[in-house]
Amino acid sequence: MKLNELRDNPGATKPRKRVGRGPGSGMGKTAGRGIKGQKSRSGVAINAYEGGQMPLYMRLPKRGFNKPNRKKFAVVNLGLLQKFIDAKKLDPKKEITEDVLLEAGVIRRKLDGVRVLAKGEITSKVKLSVTGASKAAIEAVEKAGGSLAVNSATAAE
């Protein structure tokens, strides 16, 4: 097969419907929009309007709740920490705090604190001091011979 022999499947493309092109087309004069009224004009979109019937989005019950004072943590995975240690961007001998993580570029901003999660492997012996950590992350760090201190009592699980 050559490039000039490529063809679309039969029936895959149809010519576009040209409305308002005379009575012989079957879509002449009002172009299938009926006579007068809001919907016959151009530039009108009545989304979710159901002709006075209670719209679907109002018939469905409200669900959920967004806490206005919720805390947003910068998330750091153990695998990422190990990657930065291997790349010599973090020193495992010194204590790793949130400011150290920020300077090394592990996180962009602290938000309400830094939370360590257990995704990935950590092999280095590190001393971490962060706002929060998952139980699995604490276990993984201690298993590698390090320690993980959680500063805030409210963030710990």
Image: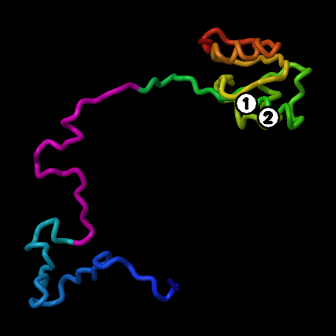
Q: Secondary structure at mark 2?
A: helix
Looking at this view, name the residue that lies furthest to the right.
93
Residue depicted at x 24% and y 65%: 44
The residue beneath circle 1 is 79
Question: Which labelled disc corresponds to residue 83?
Answer: 2
Disc 1 residue type? Answer: Gly
**Quarter of the image containing the C terminus?**
top right
Front residue of 44 and 152? 152
Q: Position of residue 75 (x, y in %)?
A: 65, 29
Q: Position of residue 103 (x, y in %)?
A: 82, 34
How is the structure coloured here? rainbow
The picture quadrant where one finds residue 71 is top right
CB contact under 8 Å: marks 1 and 2 = yes
The picture quadrant where one finds residue 39 is bottom left
Residue depicted at x 84% and y 22%: 124
The part of the chain drawn in magenta is 42-65
Q: Secondary structure at mark 1?
A: helix
Disc 2 residue type? Answer: Lys
